[in-house]
Image (cartoon, rainbow, N blue to C red):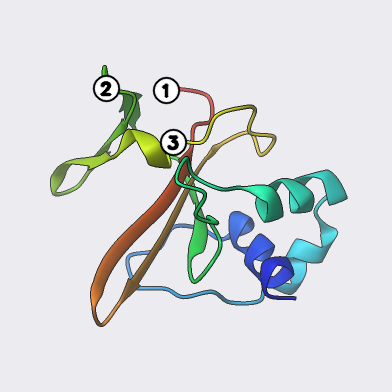
Amino acid sequence: MFRYVCVTLGVLSVTATPSSAKWKEQYSQSPPTIQAWYRAQQNEKGEWCCDNADGHPYFGSYRLTKDGGVELQLEGGRYKIPAYMLLKGPNPTGHAVWWYIDNEVGHFDLCFAAGALN
């Protein structure tokens, strides 16, 4: 059940406020293949992308780095996601997806799936 709820996170918009996993009913309209893709994602360390995290569509500027990581261009400057968090294989969503949580303890990245590079 938790993974199914987590799958909903791929259709959420990126917001400026901290977020946590939330059920979005409109996700039930997504194709089963997209839902299954979200449920199956793990980073190279074997950590589930959706465990205790949100999957946020990412439409900002980014680039793949020489060491295999991802560098995002955010308002505060550049932000780097380590290579082990970059997912390999096709991303069926049509856009990049960044899995992270923000809470009272801090910001935690889990995964990043590249979309079409911009």
Residue at the limit of the structure toward the top, as seen here: 66
Residue wearing tag 1: 118
Q: Residue at x 53, y 30 (%)?
A: 115
Residue in front for this viewpoint, 84 or 93: 84
Which residue is the extreme one toward the bottom?
A: 104
Q: Quadrant of residue 48?
A: bottom right
Q: Amino acid at mark 2?
A: Asp
- Residue holding disc 3: 86
Q: Earlier in the sequence, mark 3 or mark 1?
A: 3
Q: Examine the rendering and report whether any part of residue 60 can be seen.
A: no
Residue depicted at 25% across the width and 82% down the height? 104
**How far across and down, in percent of the image, does residue 35 sit?**
76, 53
Residue 72 appears at what percent x and percent y?
28, 37
Q: Secondary structure at mark 3?
A: loop
**Vertical relation: 106 (above or below) 79:** below
Give whichever of 15, 41 is nearer the camera. 41
| Label located before the other in sequence (2 or 3) | 2
Residue type highlighted by circle 3: Leu
Residue with the most extreme left position: 77
Residue 82 located left or right of residue 26: left
- Looking at marks 1 and 2 on the same chain, the residue that comes earlier in the sequence is marked by 2
Q: Position of residue 4 (x, y in %)?
A: 74, 67
Quadrant of residue 68 in the image? top left
Which residue is labeled 2 in the image?
Answer: 67
Identify which residue is drawn at 83% across, 59% down: 29
Query: CA–CA distance between discs 2 and 3?
Result: 11 Å
Give the SS element for disc 1.
loop
Looking at the rendered structure, the kind of residue marked 1 is Asn
Asked if residue 73 lies left or right of residue 10, the reply is: left
Point out residue 44 in the picture as x, y percentages from the top left corner: 47, 40
